[in-house]
Image (tube, rainbow, N blue to C red):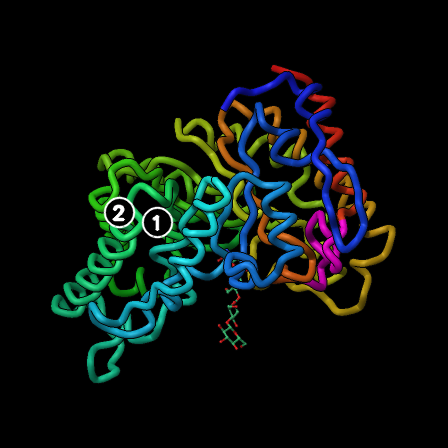
Amino acid sequence: MKSFPRSITCLLALTLVSSGQTQTQPTLKAAFSRDFPIGVAVNERQFTGRDTHGVAIITNQFNSISPENALKWESVHPRPGTNGYDFSAADAYVDFGEKHHMLIVGHTLAWHSQTPRWVFEDENGRPLRGTNAADRALLLERLHDHILTVVGRYKGRIKIWDVVNEALSDGDTFNDRVILRQWSPWVRVLGDEFISKAFEWAHEADPDAILRYNDYSVENEAKRKRLIVLIKKLQEKHVPVMAIGLQTHANLTWPSPALEDEALTDIAKLGLPMHITELDVNASAAGQRTQSADVAENARASRDGAAASAEAQAQLATQYTNLFKVFLKHRDKIKLVTFWGVTDADSWRRDGRPLLFDLEGNPKPALADVLKIAQASGSP
Ligand code: G3I
């Protein structure tokens, strides 16, 4: 697509009709058109067109989409066996992306969460064991069938896949003997073998897809070290891992600009493109905890309304502008920035009021601040 100088691009403001108001706003995708695509996680009400207001924001502001839940194992493969698939939601998601000329992401193939119990049990409901060769073979066969079927179905249409999600262990203390999340059933039964197999099979199913490893809080030094150990080991084995996804579920002060800059600089040494995959900023009082815990833990959003305060939302605007300044500094290595939800009402942590569009879907002042960062950065 021909790109225009930023100043012209941003002046090509589109009219955003939002909840009956007419506002003229530069769009995120236009403002960052010379830097990276701007994506958003979409839910079923949006990709089926029922949320007309959300669709208007998505098609105006973004040029990439990720499926918040529609392509997770529990959604596409709820029951065992080759006839246990249900592609109704995933097909609608991909059709929506193609209808609106979006860069379409697939999320996610192998994850310990939102994966049905049957995947990790034998036909009698006994949990599979890593000490049992037949159990290991059965789980590998299931993973192979899932990946070849799902990635194969959308070959050439889904351009980026989160092949493995959140396989690293948490915690502030690095121990090179505990790299992976030990309680994950994938790790318990298969060790790290499931990771290399998942990437190899995804590449077999669609050789042109960009295959991504995705995780959260990798700005945390100990977790970042685990990430680097894992990815280097995969690279040594010539496993086709092609990009690193940093989820970036932030809070008002974490990661600091300096920490984000340090993390991106460090991870870039792996020689792989980086994607910001699930960006949001938790503004709730309960959400300001350390990031060494599991994402579900550090995502706590209290219903105390603190997040909605003018003070909290002003801090949110500052955090977003700080992060985007760092993203632009690393624009040569960052190839996609995706927000994890359209409006605060859609967010998995809605009480943290974490996004750039409020509960009613109106743009927050933080949106204008982020757009100013794009304009201020000037053309490279
Ligand atoms: O589908 C059921 C529905 O049938 C039921 O009526 C309803 C009420 O119980 O629950 C629905 O399932 C919910 C699912 O989202 C689909 O909406 C689950 O309860 C709910 O826990 C699940 O939350 C998702 C969460 O992942 C699960 O861990 C969030 O929407 C989604 O935003 C969040 O996204 C994850 C990324 O995939 C990976 N990175 C972390 C991020 C935040 O946890």
Which residue does the image show at 69% across and 27% down from the upper left?
Answer: 12
Q: Nearer the viewer, residue 270 or 345?
A: 345
User: Residue flagged by tag 1: what amino acid is it?
Assistant: Val
Q: Residue 314's x, y, as percent?
A: 83, 45
Q: Nearer the viewer, residue 288 or 24?
A: 24
* Magenta residue check for 359: yes
Judge whether 208 appears above or below 295 on screen.
Answer: above
* Residue highlighted by disc 2: 202
Judge whether 375 appears above or below 343 on screen.
Answer: above
Q: Exactly how many numbered labels are in the figure? A: 2
Q: Residue 77's x, y, as percent?
A: 31, 67
**Label at residue 163:** 1
Q: Nearer the viewer, residue 330 or 362?
A: 362
Which residue does the image show at 64% across and 49% down from the upper left?
Answer: 56
Q: Which residues are magenta?
A: 350-362
Distance from the alpha carbon under mark 1 to that under mark 2:
7 Å
| In this picture, residue 128 sits left or right of residue 40 | left
| In this picture, residue 265 sits left or right of residue 104 | right
| In this picture, residue 62 sits left or right of residue 146 | right
Quadrant including the C terminus: top right
Secondary structure mostly seen in magenta is loop
* Magenta residue check for 97: no
